[in-house]
Amino acid sequence: MPNLISSLTNTLTSGINAVQKGIVDTQTQLSSGTKILNAAEVGIVTRLSAQATGYKSVSQNIAAGTNVINVGNTALSSISTILSQAKDIAIQAANAGLQTTDRTALNTTFAQLITQVTNLISNAGVNGENVLVAGGTNLTVQSGITGGASSQTTISNLNISVTSLGVNASTVATQTGAQSAIDSLTSALSSVSTYQSTLSATKTGLDSSAAAALSLSTNLQATVDSIQNVDQTALQAKLQQLNNQQAIDYYLISQMNTAAAQSLTIFR
């Protein structure tokens, strides 16, 4: 009989130790908010977390590139407005009834407008990146995480200047010059419209890539969270259950110890 009680006591003690370990593990998970993972799960979480971070960075890189395009498009919109104003002046200057002094005054305003165009082109940059200015470089955006050319999107520099627009030598100081300026500005406005369409198309493509990258990052992170994040409510219930089991086990052991002590008195 004493041996049987002793054996049962040992069994309960092992159970108590297992329950105690369960309590400690559960409390650790509740405190950290993450599960205790096995080696395979740790490997999966590490890999997916790296991918999620990579796609998030891609989304941020694309956003930076899109900002450059937005500034360029804003500049082009202003340039279009100014060129339209310059064309209006050229149309006025082409009027045969104007005096020379009138055309000279109009030409001064005209030249100021063309200077504004030059300044807009030069200042259409973000952090040194300018996709409008002549002589500028192409902008390469990291749009993927695999590396190499397949993970890059190139925003071609438009190399715009008043010279390329054909209005740098325009003058409205004479009727002939004004008529020539009208033709040049009509062509320049058409070119600016084409540039705007080019940048808008590029932006649309980048926006699509950014949305895809952000979606992938979000989905990957959600998968990581589902693997490692704990269910607080479920763990709290489990902890309560373990505490209850521990209390029962302690009670049973105390009862068995009492029974063992009583049994021993019989054999004395």
Image: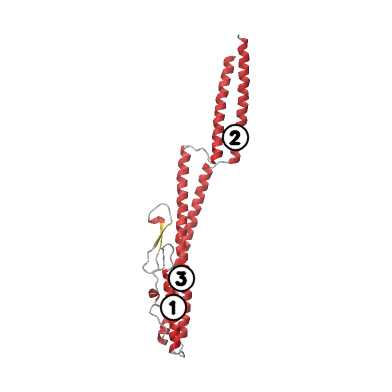
Q: Residues within 10 Å of mark 2 (few under 14, many from 20)?
A: many
Q: Secondary structure at mark 2?
A: helix
**x%, y% of residue 183?**
42, 81
Q: Nearer the viewer, residue 86 or 227?
A: 86
Residue to which mark 1 is pinned = 112
**Camera-nearest label, 2 or 1:** 1
Asked if 72 appears above or below 170 in the picture, the reply is above
Numbered mark located on residue 74 in the image: none
Picture quarter containing residue 101? bottom left
**Residue plotted at (61% across, 29% down):** 245
**Residue plotted at (47% across, 74% down):** 80
Numbered mark located on residue 76 in the image: 3
**x%, y% of residue 173?**
41, 85
Q: Nearer the viewer, residue 148 or 265?
A: 265
**Residue plotted at (62% across, 21% down):** 254
Numbered mark located on residue 239 in the image: 2
Q: State the separation of the CA atoms marked 2 and 1.
A: 78 Å
**x%, y% of residue 77?**
48, 71
Mark 3 and mark 1 lie on one chain; the one further toward the N terminus is 3
